[in-house]
Amino acid sequence: MFEYKLQIGCLIVIAYFIVNYIKGNADKKVSCNPGFDALLYIAPWAIIFDGATAWTVNHQDIVPEIVNRALHLVFIVSMEAVVSIIFVYMLYQVFGRPNKWLFLLECLPGIASIIITVLFIRELYYVSGGTTNYSMGISVIACYLSLVIQFFILFVTVCAKIRTLEKRKSMGIISFIAVCILILIVQILKPESLVSCLLPTIAIAGMYTHFEDPAEKRLNQYNDNMVRSFATLIESRDDNTGGHIRRTQGYVRIILDQMAKCKKYNNILTKDYVSNVIKAAPMHDIGKIAVPDYILQKPAKLTPQEFDIMKLHSEKGGEIIRETFNELDEPEYQQIAYEVARYHHEKWNGKGYPEGLHEKKIPLHARIMAIADVFDAVSAKRVYRDAMPVEKCFKIIEEGVGTDFDPTIAELFLSAKKEVLAYMKADKARS
C-alpha cells in the first residue's frame, strides 16, 4: 500500500472540498464555474489512475503488461486534461474570457504530448528506485516536458498582467502556479517521489480558497445587492426607482465588451478591472444624497445657483465612498468606485467638473461612465422633460466625440448601436 498512500491522502483532501462545495451550492443561489466543476470531476480520476500505475509498476509479476500500459496511457491523458482545465480557468481569472491565442499555445504541448504518449506507450519501461519502481520512457518525458511548458506559459502570462490584478488575487495565483511548478520539478528530478498527484490537489485547494468558496461568493453577492439597493434608494428621491442605475450599468457593460475587442485595451481589461467597473457603476450618483429634494425633484430647468449645488454631488459621492468603504478589503474596487463617482462629469476638453480634468487625465472608468450616464440621461424620461428620440440620443453622443467624450470610447459605443438598441428593448420589456 505504501506505493499509493500519497494518492489516497490526496483523494481524501479533494473529497473534503467536493463535499463542502456541493453543500455550499445546494441552494443554487451562487453561480458555479464550469471549469472548476470539470476539475472536481476529472482530477480524482487522474489521481486514481496515478495510484493504480504506482501499484502496477511494483507488481509486474501479477499485472499483465497490456493493462499496465493502458493504465499509464489513461493516467497521462487525464493529467493533461487536468492541466488544460487549470490553464483555461486561470486565463478566465486573469482575462475574464479565454484568450484564443494563448489557449491555442497551451493546447499545442498537450496535444503533442498525448500523440507522443500514444505512439510510444509500447516503449515504456520501469526503473527500480530506492523505495519504489517508477515508469520512464519517451511518453513519460513528453508528459513532463509538456506540463513544464504549459505552466511556464501560464506563469509568464499572469506575471505580464500582475499590475492590473487585485493584489489579493494576484498573489494567490502566482503562489499557486509557483507551487505547481515546484512539484513538477521535484517529480522530474526525483521520479520515484511520485508527487504528481499533488498538482491537481493543490489546484483544487487553491481555486476553492481564492475563487470558488460558496460562502465567500454568497457574501460578495449580498454585498453587491446591498450596494445596489443603497444606490437605488438614493435614486428614488428624484422619482427614479433604479432604472437609471440598471440601464447605465448595462451601457457600461456594452462599452466594456466593445473595448475588449480592441487591442488598445488588452493590458487593461482584466477580469478584475471589468468586474470592478461594472460593480462601481451603480455608485456614480451616490452623492445625490447630499442634494436637497427641491432641486432633485424640480420639474423645470435648474437655475445657475441650483445647478452649482447639483454639481456638488460628484465631490460628495467620492467623499461618501471613501468614508463608507475605507475598511473594505478591495482597494482596487474602492478606488474605481471613488473615481467613477467623482469624475463621471469631467469632459474630454477639460470643461467638466469638479476639477476640470481633460483627456487621459480623467480615469478610464470615469470616461466610460460619462458616456453611459449622458446617453441614459437623454434617452430616459425625467421629471422636467420627456425622453428624447433614440436617434437624437446617439446624435448627442456623436456630437460630443472629442469634446465631451473620449473619442475612441465614444466611437466604440456608437459602433455598438445594435447592441444598445437590443438592450433598451429588453430593459423596457422587463420594466
Image: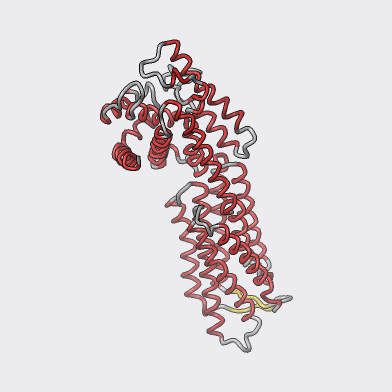
Instruction: Classify residue 21 as left or right of residue 305.
Output: right
Instruction: Classify residue 318 as left or right of residue 358.
Output: right
Work out whether residue 192 or residue 277 is closer to the camera in this orientation and state it. Answer: 277
User: In the rendered image, which quarter is residue 393 located in?
Assistant: top left
Instruction: Classify residue 274 as left or right of residue 250.
Output: right
User: In the rendered image, which quarter is residue 198 located in?
Assistant: bottom right
Q: Visible in this render: residue 361? A: no
Horizontal and vertical percent position of residue 23 = 57, 61
From this view, report whether residue 89 is shown above or below residue 416.
Answer: below
Work out whether residue 44 or residue 99 is closer to the camera in this orientation and state it. Answer: 44
The quarter of the picture where the N terminus appears is bottom right
Taking the spot 68% from the left edge, 76% from the top edge, the residue there is 3
Taking the spot 53% from the left edge, 52% from the top edge, the residue there is 90
From this view, report whether residue 363 is shown above or below residue 269.
Answer: above
Q: Visible in this render: residue 341? A: yes
Taking the spot 52% from the left edge, 79% from the top edge, the residue there is 70
Which residue is outermost to the right?
130
From this view, report whether residue 166 is shown above or below residue 79.
Answer: above
From this view, report whether residue 320 is shown above or below residue 115.
Answer: above
